[in-house]
Amino acid sequence: LYDQGYHFSHDWCGLLEVSYKDSLKTRQKAFENINAWPKGLIHSINKDQASKVSNLTLNNGGLFLPQAGWIAPQELVNQLFNAAKDTNRLRIETNVSVNNINFKNNKWQIDSNKGSFSSEILVICGGAEAIKLNLIDQLPLTSVGGQITGMKTNENIKKLATVICHKGYLTPENNGQHCIGATFDKNTFDTNTTLAADNYNLAMLAKCLPEI
């Protein structure tokens, strides 16, 4: 997609799952002994190696995935839509609320606030909102709310060179900001952001990675 000219912010800079507590250090040691995965995919590193790949001084090592990284989701989705529209095989209808879905005469019938649609093929990609649909509500699915926080970069972390995962995560700087997160609230459809969730994300970062 990117090579076809549909650009979006991203960086395959690797990902460090830092062993910030004793149980994770024990798991890391067990991982080293098993030696089950190719090192090009994931391997164990000590705190000096972790500091080198992250470009920050860290107190602990961890498991490093050199081929992982970060991507800007909204930019990627917009470019996926642009690429699909350029094929002339996609039409996007916005602000549509689907009320009911039925299968009649070998076609899917979709009733919405903008009228009815029909199609031989139906793919549901509605995230948590899809749970409310009549075809989906019979499945044992649960909605989970997760808020991320955009944090302005500073002198301490602006040099971060890889994604760091702890109980949450911290991404390298992009357009002057880092992405940290995330909350994990079960059984909620609320998409409003809150100051309490931002404070939780910041507190978790400070607890797990106090050195930065």
Image: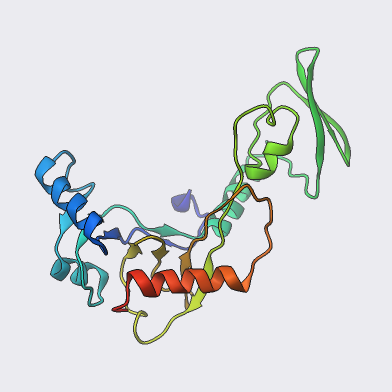
Q: Residue at x 68, y 37 (%)?
A: 131
Q: Residue at x 46, y 53 (%)?
A: 2
Q: Residue at x 23, y 73 (%)?
A: 58
Q: Position of residue 77 (x, y in %)?
A: 58, 52
Q: Is residue 46 left or right of residue 157?
A: left
Q: Is residue 11 above or below residue 126?
A: below
Q: Is residue 128 left or right of residue 30?
A: right
Q: What is the quadrant of residue 24 in the picture?
A: bottom left
Residue, far left: 33
Q: Position of residue 103 (x, y in %)?
A: 77, 18
Q: Is residue 94 above or below residue 69?
A: above
Front one among 71 and 152: 152
Q: Position of residue 61 (x, y in %)?
A: 19, 64
Residue, far top: 105
Residue, far front: 22
Is residue 200 shown to the viewer in this render? yes
Q: Is residue 85 left or right of residue 205?
A: right
Q: Residue at x 38, y 75 (%)?
A: 206
Q: Is residue 123 left or right of residue 40?
A: right
